[in-house]
Image (cartoon, rainbow, N blue to C red):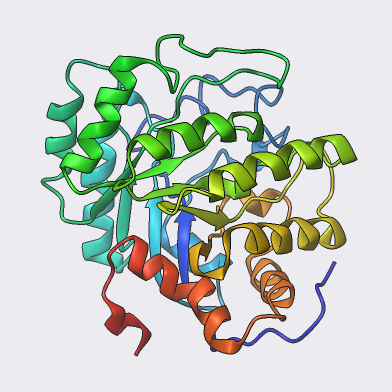
Amino acid sequence: MAAPHALPHAMPIVDAHHHLWDLTRGRYPWLQQDYDPQAFFLGDYQALRQDFMPADYRAASAGCNVIATVHVEAERDRHEQVAETAWLSGLNGRHGLPNAVVAHVWLDRPDTEERLLQHLQYPMVRGIRSKPVTSGSPQQSVRGQPGSMQDPAWLRGLSLLEKHGLSWDLRVPCWHLAEAAEVAAQFPALPIVLNHHGFAWDRSPEGLQRWRTGMEVLARQPNVHVKLSEFGLRDQPWSWPDNRRILRETVAIFGWQRCMFASNFPVAGLRVGFQELVQGVLAALAHLTLAQQQAVMAGNALRFYRLPGSLLS
């Protein structure tokens, strides 16, 4: 299924969110021994259970002008958190990507700062993704539980990101967005970026209103940005009419100045090709000026992840 309009191959792209893995060098429980399609948000993901390396990324993104990429931790075995960062640093030296790393640490552990300092030995590290404890549905609550966004130990760990000049990649279901806004308000100097448009998984009128309300509350915090990524739904085919609407609403809520393109490849590849994704996002951004589109596709991510602006020249 092709999205409308011709793909402008020359548009510079900074992919603000993708993953790489080598299953022979690292342990990825979710891809290996703990493979569980019932638990995965897109359903069956057998196709992901193979290496995805820089050459594979370049093959997937062929025809698109990707000038830089940001690797977000790929849920590698948590005993190998720093090893993942070291491996990615080596890939950059050999292959020229990724160009920035969002690493993982547990925020509520006594050794949080020690792990942060180990990651920071690698200059490519720009931020941390550490998922708080969340509930399985809007009807459930984990508020105040250990590891949740109200846990004092977890909040102390989050404060260390600000102390060390790191950003936070926020990934929660949409029914936790209002709680995330409370956290963002507590740390106004901490750069935060919401992963995957806040997951508008429920496309019913009630579900979309819940997502929209949470997004509007979160967007009131000026330190929060959002990634235009991962519009796929569980066990359902990709739908450009639905996804274009969600994408445009996200941009309307946050403003183009705080939105950034992200592929979430190879995961998003379960539903859509890279070129089709780029083409469809640009079609959804057609109401913006060319300069605004370029900011969403590249400039905003360069700024947020502190990558050289010279990459655009």
Specify whether 83 is left or right of 173. left
Q: Which corner quadrant holds the C terminus?
A: bottom left
The percent coordinates of residue 213 (x first, y second) are: 70, 41
Q: Is residue 25 above or below residue 20?
A: above
Farthest residue, direction top: 145
The percent coordinates of residue 39 (x first, y second) are: 66, 22
Q: Is residue 212 above or below residue 254?
A: above
Quarter location, residue 60: bottom right
**Between residues 297 and 19, which one lies in front from this camera angle?**
297
Q: Is residue 133 above or below residue 209?
A: above
Tell me if I can see residue 13 in this picture.
no
Specify whether 274 is left or right of 299. right
Residue at screen point 75% across, 36% down: 210
Q: Which corner quadrant holds the N terminus?
A: bottom right
Residue at screen point 28% across, 57% down: 91
The percent coordinates of residue 65 (x first, y second) are: 50, 81
Tell me if I can see residue 179 in this picture.
yes
Specify whether 203 is left or right of 262. right
Quarter location, residue 134: top right
The percent coordinates of residue 209 (x first, y second) are: 79, 41
**Between residues 148 and 17, which one lies in front from this camera angle?**
148
**Between residues 22 and 174, which one lies in front from this camera angle?**
174
Quarter location, residue 86: top left
Specify whether 210 is left or right of 83. right
Q: How many marks?
A: 0
Residue at screen point 73% across, 52% down: 271
Residue at screen point 34% across, 45% down: 188
